[in-house]
Amino acid sequence: MSSGGGRELRLCLLPGDGIGPEVVAAAMAALTAAGERFSFRIAAQTAAIGGAALRSAGEPLPAATRQAALGAQAVLLGAVGAPEFDGEPKARKPETGLLELRQLLGCWANLRPVRRLAGRTPLRDEVAAGADLIVLRELIGGLYFGEPRGFADNGQAAFNTLRYSVEEIERLARFGFALARRRRRKLTSVDKANVLETSQLWRQVFQRVGAEYPDVALEHMYVDNCAMQLILNPRQFDVLATENLFGDILSDEAGVLAGSLGLLPSASLGGQVGIYEPVHGSAPDLAGKGWANPAGAILSAAMMLRHSFPLEAAATAVETAVTDTLAAGVLTRDLAPPEAAFATTDEFTRAVVGRLRG
Ligand code: NAD
Ligand code: IPM
Ligand code: MN
């Protein structure tokens, strides 16, 4: 079904910290305009996560937030993280709230699409032009969640565990091959198999599963080389499938291809309720200034319409409104030339909403 038929979309909104509330408000404005055009309504319940939740409830993912997320059809999240909690233990870190949420909702597949969109990039045009890839990041395993972990020897040492099971790797591999089939049929599995046992297992599993997808070209690449290839020749990539930490790092790097980290959206899938959030963080340096680029959050809302409902025509309309706004030269501060005038978060959002209203 491409039109909403008057239905109600039940969302859990988690604005979070820093610029999170600003970009979530922008995404909601775009969703509301899309709903008027495609005949759906948004019923949103807002809850606290991250530093905001630590301040109001003493924990980064309070029970009320867990309940709101589990009861929604999709979660739209801004960002978490605030400098005041930087020195705190794990249980009192805003980031812990986000990691617990991903685990609670079983979101093991994180899609981070990257296309050259607009604005400044330090890369020459002939390098970045035409880049169109998707980072498929494993999201609830690896070093982020492995046990045991902690500090030892009176704080003189610290350790984390990098562990992956065949099952965790295999489900991501199948997701990646199916995704590549709907794109340009190339999958690059990124690992560090020359050093790490987890990567050796990763490579074996991708090799075995890949035999079931003979129409998809599978290649293996070491993560250090991949980091270099991404900015040397990004057009060689279609789907990049990788473990949690590698995917975190490579996706920020890929933001440079798009034009700004503020442009990148994401979808976290695999469980009953998907999480949609921009790739960027809470950018405390920008908060409250009207400088945040809301495109990543608005494009995340488009991914939500596509993957959770699915309202494909509305998703495409939101994406087109964003790309047309950028193409018309409405650029936030991160995209505009250094001394030039730039659009505020609200001005950019109004331009997108105006295009959606037609
Ligand atoms: P960041 O992504 O917040 O910022 C990195 C750089 O990109 C900064 O220069 C920032 O100004 C710029 N930037 C980010 N988003 C932008 C936007 N929408 N528009 C324009 N410019 C933008 O990363 P950081 O500075 O390393 O981390 C800040 C905090 O955010 C930390 O607490 C970190 O843990 C957290 N964080 C959260 C998430 C998340 O919630 N998903 C992701 C990354 C970092
Ligand atoms: C991201 C962020 C998170 C991560 C942090 C805030 C926990 O950097 O979504 O990319 O590392 O996954
Ligand atoms: Mn990150």
Image (tube, rainbow, N blue to C red):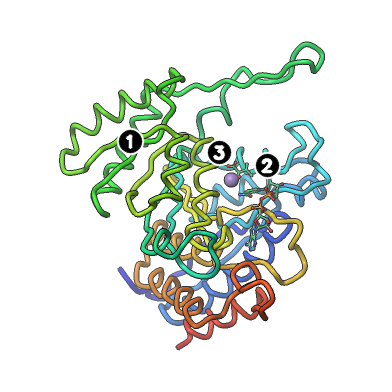
User: Which image quadrant is residue 109 in?
Assistant: top left
Beta carbon at label 2 within 8 Å of ligand 2: yes
Disc 1 + disc 2, Cβ < 8 Å: no
- Determine the CA span between mark 3 and mark 1: 22 Å
Q: Earlier in the sequence, mark 2 or mark 3?
A: 2
For disc 1, the marked residue is 173
Kindly identify which numbered label has been placed on residue 95.
Answer: 2
Graded by Cα atoms within 10 Å as few (under 14), some (14 to 19) or many (20 or more), the crowding at tag 3 reads some
Farthest residue to the bottom: give it.
358
Query: Hey, what amino acid is under mark 2?
Result: Glu
The quarter of the picture where the C terminus appears is: bottom left
Q: Position of residue 69 (x, y in %)?
A: 58, 50
83 left or right of 256 in image: right
Residue shown at the point (44%, 60%) measured from the top left: 303
For disc 3, the marked residue is 104
- Determine the CA span between mark 2 and mark 3: 14 Å
Q: Is residue 137 above or below residue 236?
A: above
Label 2: which secondary element: helix
243 left or right of 202 in image: right
Q: Position of residue 56 (x, y in %)?
A: 81, 50
56 left or right of 9 in image: right
Q: Position of residue 301 (x, y in %)?
A: 50, 64
Query: Hey, what amino acid is under mark 1?
Result: Ala
Q: Earlier in the sequence, mark 1 or mark 2?
A: 2
Residue shown at the point (67%, 66%) measured from the top left: 292
